Amino acid sequence: MNSFPSCIGIFDSGVGGLSVLKALRQELPQENLLYFSDSAFAPYGERSEQEVVQRSEHITATLIQQGAKALVIACNTATAAAVHHLRQQYPKLPIVGVEPALKPASISSQTRQVGVLATQRTLSSQKFANMLQTCSHNCHFHLRAATGLALAIELGEQSQIKNLLIEHLKALGKFGHAPGQIDTLVLGCTHYPLVIELIQELVGPTIHVLDNAPAIAKHTHVLLKNNQKNSPLGVSANAGGICYQTSGDLKKLQQFATSLGL
Ligand code: DGL
C-alpha cells in the first residue's frame, strides 16, 4: 500500500503538529508530506506512557506502509515516550523528534529564569528529566503541566483556552526582566504555538516565547540531506503535496489546516 511514495510521515495526537507541518512546508517545499492526526486518542498528555507508545508504533507502521521515507514525531509527548522504541524498531529510518527547547532558552535568558509549559506526560518523562539536568546548572526552570490546554486548543474553545492560559502562566511565576523574573517561555507542546499570539499578549511583548518548529524543520532538512534521500520528486504530480489522515474527523482537520494557511 505505497499510496504516497517518498513522503515524510508526520504525526501528533491532534492538530498541534500542524504548527510543525507548516514549518516543514516552508523549509521543504518540494517534499510530499503525509500528516496523521490521532484526534480519537487525544490528548496524549493525559494518557499512560504505554498507550502513547502503542499509538506511536501503530501510526508509524501505517505511515511507513504508505511510503514514508522519514518520520517527524510532531509531538513532545509522543517523542518523550516513544522515540527510543521507534529508533530501535526502524534503525534505518530517519526519525526526528520534538523536545521542549530548554537549551536554546537557557542560552538566551538574561535573568536565567525560564518558564516551561508542557503536558504532564512530557514533564514526568525520563527524557525530560535528563534534559533538565543537563541545562539546569546555569538556569532555573519553572515547570507547569498545562492540563486541559491541548484539548481546549484541539476543540477550538476560545474562552476556555484564555482562562487556562491565564491560570497556567500565573502558576509559573512573574514574567519580566528584573532579577528573579521569567524572561523566556518555552512552549513544550506543539499545540501551544497555535495560540502563540494570545500567549505573547498575556506575558507581554518583551518576553521571549520559544516555538522550536522552524528549528525542527531545519533539522529534518539536514537529516534528509545526510541520508541523500531528499531528492525532490520532480515530474511526479504529487511533489510538494500534503495528505491529511486522522483517527477522528477529517473535515475538521482539513478546516483547521486551511485556517493556518496550509
Ligand atoms: N501536541 C502534543 C505535544 O506536543 C500533545 C498534546 C496532547 O495530546 O496532550 O506534546
Image (cartoon, helix red, strand yellow):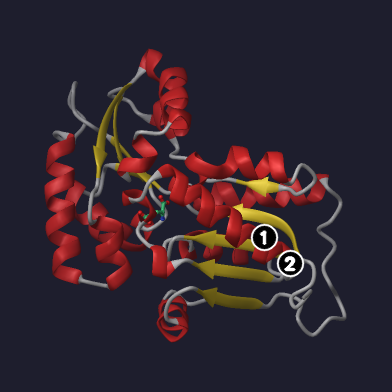
Is 243 displayed left or right of 228 in the figure? left
Q: Residue at x 64, y 49 (%)?
A: 218
Q: Residue at x 13, y 51 (%)?
A: 166
Name which residue type carries label 1: Ala
In 3D space, how far apart are the residues under numbered discs 1 and 2 (Cα atoms)? Answer: 6 Å
Q: Which residue is mark 2?
A: 65
Q: x%, y% of residue 165?
A: 18, 53
Q: Residue at x 62, y 77 (%)?
A: 243
In terms of depth relative to the viewer, which is nearer, 175 or 81? 81
Q: Which residue is mark 1?
A: 61
**Dot 1: few (<14), some (14–19), or many (≥20) neighbours within 10 Å?**
some
Q: x%, y% of residue 216?
A: 57, 48
**Element at badge 2?**
helix
Name which residue type carries label 2: Gln
Labels 1 and 2 touching (C-beta < 8 A): yes
In terms of depth relative to the viewer, which is nearer, 51 or 258? 51
